[in-house]
Image (cartoon, grey):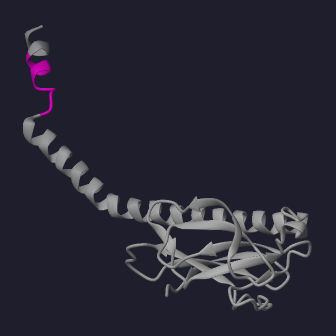
């Protein structure tokens, strides 16, 4: 009986062993945090890209359905993207592509994601859904005139993503593009 009582006293962890385990956990956590924050930023970028694609499709559908008809002098639905901004705005436009007629809802991108490409408005023509750039030129077949680039506000690298709109109104996402 006496040996069992003595052995029970020696089965606990020592303070040195506990400190070693806690320091190992601390070091492992410190090493994992930068990777995790990069993962979160990457996921925010992907989710923001999906939201932009969805909103471009919404503007295109509104244009094709004739929301705000020609009687209201609305010929185009557009989304206004501004460089280094995290907000973009749905608008309707007259035949001159100039001033918005009706300002609709605005959308905010996630966390520190901003528009990295230069200022641009993407227009969709009522009834046809054809896409045009800010200059009024149709988007070309490979989307050169109509590319929205999103990336992190405080960029530490060259990882951005883009949404490309082609002349037929097709909307595509491309990841891993270099940031402007």
Q: Is residue 11 above or below residue 122?
A: above
Give residue 157's quadrant in the image: bottom left
The structure residue drawn at horizontal position 84% and vertical position 75%, both measured from the top left corner, is 75
Is residue 54 shown in magenta?
Answer: no
Residue 26 position in % (x across, y down) = 22, 51
Give residue 82's quadrant in the image: bottom right
The structure residue drawn at horizontal position 64% and vertical position 62%, both measured from the top left corner, is 51
Q: How many marks?
A: 0
Can you say which quadrant of the picture contains the N terminus? top left
Residue 155 position in % (x across, y down) = 40, 77
The structure residue drawn at horizontal position 69% and vertical position 85%, both measured from the top left corner, is 146
Residue 85 position in % (x across, y down) = 49, 72
Residue projecting furthest to the top: 1
The residue closer to the viewer here, 122 or 147, is 122
The structure residue drawn at horizontal position 91% and vertical position 76%, both measured from the top left corner, is 128
Region in magenta = 6-13
Is residue 10 shown in magenta?
Answer: yes
Give residue 92's quadrant in the image: bottom right
The residue closer to the viewer here, 126 or 165, is 126
Residue 34 position in % (x across, y down) = 34, 63
Q: Is residue 166 above or below residue 74?
A: below
Q: Is residue 121 left or right of residue 6?
A: right
């Amino acid at each position: 009986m006496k040996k069992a009582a003595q052995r029970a006293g020696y089965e606990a962890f020592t303070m040195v062993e506990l400190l070693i385990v806690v320091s190992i956990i601390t070091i492992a956590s410190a090493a994992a945090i930068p990777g995790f924050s990069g993962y979160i930023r990457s996921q925010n970028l992907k989710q923001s890209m999906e939201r932009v694609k969805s909103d471009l499709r919404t503007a295109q559908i509104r244009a094709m359905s004739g929301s705000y008809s020609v009687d209201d002098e609305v010929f185009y639905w557009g989304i206004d993207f501004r460089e280094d901004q995290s907000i973009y705005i749905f608008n309707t436009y007259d035949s001159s592509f100039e001033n918005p007629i009706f300002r609709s809802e605005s959308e905010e991108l996630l966390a520190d994601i901003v528009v990295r490409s230069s200022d641009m408005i993407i227009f969709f023509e009522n009834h046809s859904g054809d896409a045009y750039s800010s200059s009024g030129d149709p988007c070309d077949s490979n989307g050169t005139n109509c590319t929205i680039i999103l990336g992190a506000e405080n960029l530490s690298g060259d990882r951005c993503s883009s949404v490309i709109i082609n002349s037929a109104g097709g909307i595509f996402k491309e990841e891993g593009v270099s940031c402007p």
